[in-house]
Image (tube, grey):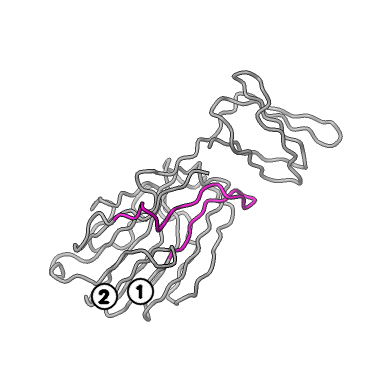
Amino acid sequence: MPRILGNKNEGARIIVFDENDWSIESNTLETGSGAYEIEGLNENDKTVIARNDVGEVEGYGAITPFADDIEEEFGVAYREVRPSGAWNSKKPDVTFDKRTDNGTYIMMSNSIARDCWMHYFAVFNKNTLNGRKLRIDWSASTGNGAQTKLLIADGKYDRTSFADFPHESGVPYTSKGNGDLFTFVDTTNSFSRYTYTTGVLNMSTASLDQVTLFIYGRSPYLKSLQINVWDLKLLSSSNVLVSDFDLAGSSFVKELQLTDHDYGRCGTPIDL
């Protein structure tokens, strides 16, 4: 739902007026200094007034709320990438599927003497992420030299596109806008299941309107890799749940299989 963001030098009561009928749409006490966020608003312009403990008031009008946008077309998607040319007749053993404990997984066993790649990803409007956090419940089991990354890249990526996911290129997230905006995790080690939460995201470095969250795996020759994802959430700056993703429900669709560029959808956002 639409929201507004602001900053304050001290604690204050924040009152939001709907300029369509001048009703009070929100009245909250925001403690301390720093950023604040008011969610659950309608799309009309707002007047926002802040009053501190000693009665000082500051206000602004004609404020248009941010409209959240999580790409319904994509939700969470996956895409396989492997070498072309002389290696085209050889396929790595790649499996995208549900876990029995309500998660999903990507597993790759690579018998090609070249790197192969796999991606989970989700496309967001950058304003949807700005001032918020992402939380992922995941694990990875890797052969020596296999790589797992969690990052946000500038631009919108399409699971069906060879332009977005060309053969021989396992790192497409450098090709649009300002490229790799944030890398949160980059490891060649296995790790047990744990929950990772980003810091509050500042999307001012994104040059495009949309950005893509990537969970990336690279499998070298004769190395295996499995990435498990149980949950992906969008949180407010104060860790209040904004949106969740149904990763292992009916939205899991294997759209293309048994190729060198398998893809599908494995989660859609749940409106809260």
- Residue 2 spot, x, y in % from top left: 54, 35
- Residue 268 spot, x, y in % from top left: 40, 49
Is 29 placed left or right of 148 in the picture? right
In the picture of the structure, the residue carrying the numbered disc 2 is 110
In the picture of the structure, the residue carrying the numbered disc 1 is 225
Q: Is residue 242 magenta?
A: yes
* Label pair 1/2, CB-CB below 8 angstroms: yes
- Residue 33 spot, x, y in % from top left: 74, 45
Is 61 placed left or right of 65 in the picture? right
Amino acid type, label 2: Asn
Residue 249 versus residue 127 in the image, above or below:
below
- The outermost residue toward the right is 54
Q: Earlier in the sequence, mark 1 or mark 2?
A: 2
Secondary structure under the numbered disc 2 in the rendered image: loop
Q: Dot 2, how many residues are within 10 Å of its Cα: few (below 14), some (14-19), or many (20+)?
A: many
Residue at left 24%, top 57%?
Answer: 166
Q: Dot 1, how many residues are within 10 Å of its Cα: few (below 14), some (14-19), or many (20+)?
A: many
Secondary structure under the numbered disc 1 in the rendered image: strand
Residue at left 25%, top 50%?
Answer: 161
- Per the rendered image, the range of residues in magenta is 229-253
Amino acid type, label 1: Leu
Q: Is residue 33 magenta?
A: no
Is 60 placed left or right of 155 in the picture? right
Residue at left 56%, top 52%?
Answer: 133
